[in-house]
Image (cartoon, rainbow, N blue to C red):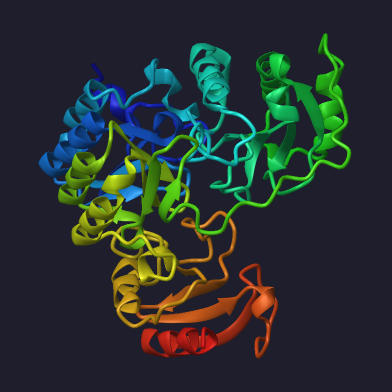
């Protein structure tokens, strides 16, 4: 399907961001990023992915903050074999040239969420098909993302992206924003029937500007004004619109769906699964797994009488369903074993810290460098590596007591501390 030369010669004009057929080398081997259709894996795809990871010697199955999955630690000699197997499992793009631009995101509960305004999966699928079919859009950055929000209770609305749409008027219209997220101000309103031609026109205009990301535009409002001039339909104002609040921790534990069934959300420690864990998840699931932007897994359509059994099985597999667990609270990048930029082994340190954190609710992010690859926005607490096993501890402004020094991570609470010291401070702040 794709030979070794094709894989190695995938265009790098936009970034070194890994894809499925354009693997990027890291310290621990190659990374294959698999962009899932609306963040979903069929049980058969999950089983195939577990087999591919095991047979290729991949060191980790990582869940991403964009509801995707990646294999890392792949030997270059196995690239062609891995890519071919992933395509045979139905995990590739309809057109291999369109692999990079499949960043269309929805809530993990889209279509089943009792709080949703409408089911946006049809619109999101149509947008994804348009991106793959139109050759001009293949020039978009691999990081370019489009979020379609249906007003779900379980949703990540604070992750900034390039374009977002949020349902309003019972799904008859969508407000939109650029270079921001649905918890921010909307730039206008589009009738539902006009969303596809609107996004088409917007993307074509954007590509003519030559920027890689929407955040590089000098003025989003002026850009929208330019797009409006080419449209045969109106962009209405979005005066007074505000996205309703989400339900805290709706991605974890047991929750009722629109029908009589339930979904159960769970998280592996630091967003990493073993092949054995992925196989067990596929065995427990009813037809599909849904990945979450919290680096977790959601099992939908569970019958009420099966929920306790499923939760027990998840715990036995090494996943947690409580928001107070370390699994739910901790996030970490690949660390020094996988990334040349990292100053500490954040994966090993995260496991060490997990055993010492008391029950709490505020997330903690361990990052090997200031790029903060594992978090699009700062979490309530950040441990920024200084050297092996030593970190600076930051807290967001609402935790600013006893803090000093401005930073995008918040207030500096302690500098150059050990993990034991970090655990002591974090535990004390939750008492």
Task: Please indicate, yes or no, whether residue 192 appears anywhere in the rendered image.
Answer: yes
Question: Which residue shows up at 20% across the image and 52% down it?
Answer: 274
The image position of residue 396, as x and y in percent, is 64, 73
- Report the side of 5 relative to 236 (left or right): left
Q: Nearer the viewer, residue 356 or 310?
A: 310
- Report the side of 193 relative to 425 (left or right): right
Rendered position, 121 above or below 33: above
The image position of residue 100, as x and y in percent, is 45, 29
Task: Please indicate, yes or no, whether residue 331 appears anywhere in the rendered image.
Answer: no
Name the image quarter holding the N terminus.
top left
The image position of residue 137, as x and y in percent, is 57, 19
Question: Which residue shows up at 40% across the image and 40% down it?
Answer: 68
Question: Which residue shows up at 32% across the image and 29% down it?
Answer: 21
- Report the side of 57 relative to 328 (left or right): left
Q: In the current view of this chain or complex, which residue is farthest to the left?
A: 55
Q: In the current view of this chain or complex, which residue is farthest to the top?
A: 232
Where on the picture, by quarter, is residue 229? top right
- Report the side of 284 relative to 373 (left or right): left
The image position of residue 370, as x and y in percent, is 53, 65
Rendered position, 102 above or below 73: above
Q: How many marks?
A: 0
Q: Nearer the viewer, residue 239 or 250?
A: 250
Rendered position, 88 above or below 52: above
């Amino acid at each position: 399907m794709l030979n070794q030369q094709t894989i190695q010669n995938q265009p790098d004009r936009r970034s070194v961001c890994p894809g499925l057929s354009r693997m990027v080398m890291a310290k621990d081997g190659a990374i294959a990023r698999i962009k899932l259709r609306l963040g979903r894996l069929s049980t058969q795809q999950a089983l195939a992915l577990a087999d591919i990871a095991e047979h290729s010697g991949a060191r980790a199955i990582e869940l991403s903050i964009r509801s995707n999955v990646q294999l890392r630690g792949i030997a270059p000699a196995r690239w062609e074999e891995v890519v071919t197997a992933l395509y045979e499992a139905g995990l590739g793009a309809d057109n291999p040239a369109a692999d990079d631009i499949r960043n269309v995101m929805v809530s993990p509960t889209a279509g089943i969420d009792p709080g949703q305004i409408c089911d946006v999966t049809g619109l999101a699928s149509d947008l994804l098909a348009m991106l793959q079919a139109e050759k001009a859009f293949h020039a978009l950055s691999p990081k370019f993302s489009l979020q379609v929000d249906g007003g779900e209770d379980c949703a990540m609305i604070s992750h900034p992206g390039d374009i977002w749409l949020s349902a309003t008027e019972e799904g008859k219209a969508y407000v939109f924003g650029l270079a921001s997220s649905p918890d921010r101000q909307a730039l206008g309103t589009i009738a539902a029937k006009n969303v596809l031609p609107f996004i088409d026109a917007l993307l074509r205009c954007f590509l003519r500007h030559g920027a890689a990301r929407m955040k590089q535009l000098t003025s989003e409002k002026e850009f929208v004004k330019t797009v409006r001039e080419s449209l045969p339909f109106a962009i209405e104002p979005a005066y007074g619109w505000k996205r309703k609040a989400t339900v805290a921790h709706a991605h974890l534990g047991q929750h009722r769906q629109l029908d009589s069934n339930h979904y159960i959300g769970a998280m592996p420690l630091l967003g990493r699964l073993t092949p054995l864990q992925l196989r067990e998840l596929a065995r427990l699931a009813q037809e599909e797994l849904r990945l979450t932007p919290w680096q977790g897994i959601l099992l939908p359509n569970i019958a009420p009488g099966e929920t306790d059994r499923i939760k027990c099985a998840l715990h036995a597999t090494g996943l947690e369903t409580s928001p107070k667990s370390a699994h739910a609270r901790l996030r970490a990048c690949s660390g020094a074993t996988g990334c040349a930029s990292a100053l500490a082994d954040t994966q090993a340190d995260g496991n060490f810290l997990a055993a010492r954190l008391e029950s709490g609710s505020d997330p903690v992010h361990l990052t090997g460098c200031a790029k903060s690859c594992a978090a699009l926005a700062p979490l309530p607490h950040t441990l920024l590596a200084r050297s092996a096993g030593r970190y600076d501890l930051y807290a967001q402004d609402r935790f600013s007591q006893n803090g000093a020094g401005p930073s995008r991570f918040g207030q500096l609470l302690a500098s150059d501390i050990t993990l034991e010291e970090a655990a002591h401070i974090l535990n004390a702040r939750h008492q």
